Image (cartoon, rainbow, N blue to C red):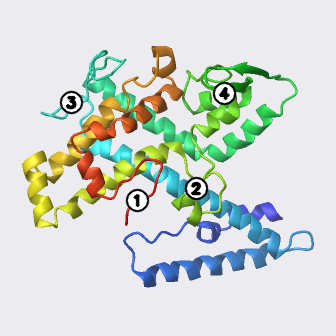
Amino acid sequence: GGTQLLQDELLPMATMEITSASKPRSQVQNEIKLKEKARATVAKKYASGTLSEEDICHCLYSIGDNSCYLQFNCDPIEKMIAFLTTTFKPHSAEPHLSLCISGGKGGARLTHNHERQYNYVLQSLTLWREITNDMFRLWCLAEEDLLSEESAYRLTDTGQGLNRVQQAPKVSKAIQQVGSAVIHLGDHNVPNALTFIDKYTQVEVSHALRLCPVPYVSAQVPRILNPIVLVIEKIPELMKDAHLAQYIEDAFGGAAHLQKMILVDFFRHGFDGSGADNFFDAGSCIDGRLTSAWNWCSNLEKKSFYTIFKLCGFDSFDGDWDK
């Protein structure tokens, strides 16, 4: 009868992720108590001779880990999608808000008008969100591909040292179901399923890991998007300082214009096919889109708004933020 608890109305409460953002301490403490009470109630209700309360709690903790993972990794993607859809019009560009790119200009390999680039960025962000939502299943499929006796591997120099090159049919099929028909797997770009997963998840100790005991918490996509989201959200706070407000007004035309300037630059050149030696490696494929985004990150110091990132506490896309 253990599977019945998955339909229990208290399950969402017992496994939800509690965040402290914009909440008073009393509210956070109350939510924690409600979560603990719901978890204890569910465990006691479904305990049996073959399923102990402790085992049920372990299951609930595991489901809670997934909630934690989704909170820290999907939230910046959702916010970036919201920035795109609320700041820009899909069919026409307002003055200074055009997303059009031209191959050969600014490092771009692609040529898109405003409407096509808008949809390209939206498609990319949506794809990243769906992959992140499905990451736990993809991990399982990656392990099955790696251990499959039907798919042998060969040790090959891919240009980045010796790598285990192996086809990953299960992961490939799952990604195509998510929505990407073009995917590098089992070639010099992405030698195997584990390498593909690693492009979205990094095994490292980070701020998120301290909050959520999942061994692959800090994903590449949130590592790219979260700093940008934090800066966009923190710019209004900078305006509370009279001197910083004057600087932003003089240099960037105000807070709103500065936010749009950052978003325009990222949505154009973070998705322009740049960052690799040829179109096939950094074009419209799922792997290439991450390559372009990382290329934008590597050039951040050259941007006119880099000082704003530093004023907001930015250190690097791999490091912590200054408090």
Which residue is labeled 4 in the image?
Answer: 172
* 229 to 101, vertically: above or below: below
Residue 143 horizontal/vertical position (percent): 77, 39
- Name the element at disc 3: loop
Check if mark 2's residue and mark 1's residue have beta carbons within 8 Å: no
**Of the image marks 1 and 4, the number of the one nearer the N terminus:** 4
Nearest to viewer (mark 3 / mark 1): 1
> What amino acid is labelled 3 in the image?
Ser
- Name the element at disc 2: helix
- Name the element at disc 4: helix
Q: Nearer the viewer, residue 98 or 290?
A: 290
> What amino acid is labelled 2 in the image?
Tyr
Nearest to viewer (mark 2 / mark 1): 1
Q: Nearer the viewer, residue 131 or 42?
A: 131
**Of the image marks 3 and 1, the number of the one nearer the N terminus:** 3
Q: Residue at x 51, y 82 (%)?
A: 29
Q: Residues within 10 Å of mark 3 (few under 14, many from 20)?
A: many
Which residue is labeled 1 in the image?
Answer: 321
**The C terminus, quarter of image:** bottom left
Which residue is labeled 2 in the image?
Answer: 69
Which residue is labeled 3 in the image?
Answer: 98
Q: Marks 3/4: CA distance?
A: 34 Å
Q: Quadrant of residue 11?
A: bottom right
Q: Marks 2/3: CA distance?
A: 34 Å
**Of the image marks 4 and 2, the number of the one nearer the N terminus:** 2
> What amino acid is labelled 1 in the image?
Trp
* 127 to 211, vertically: above or below: above
Check if mark 3's residue and mark 4's residue have beta carbons within 8 Å: no
> What amino acid is labelled 4 in the image?
Ser
Q: Residue at x 25, y 38 (%)?
A: 303
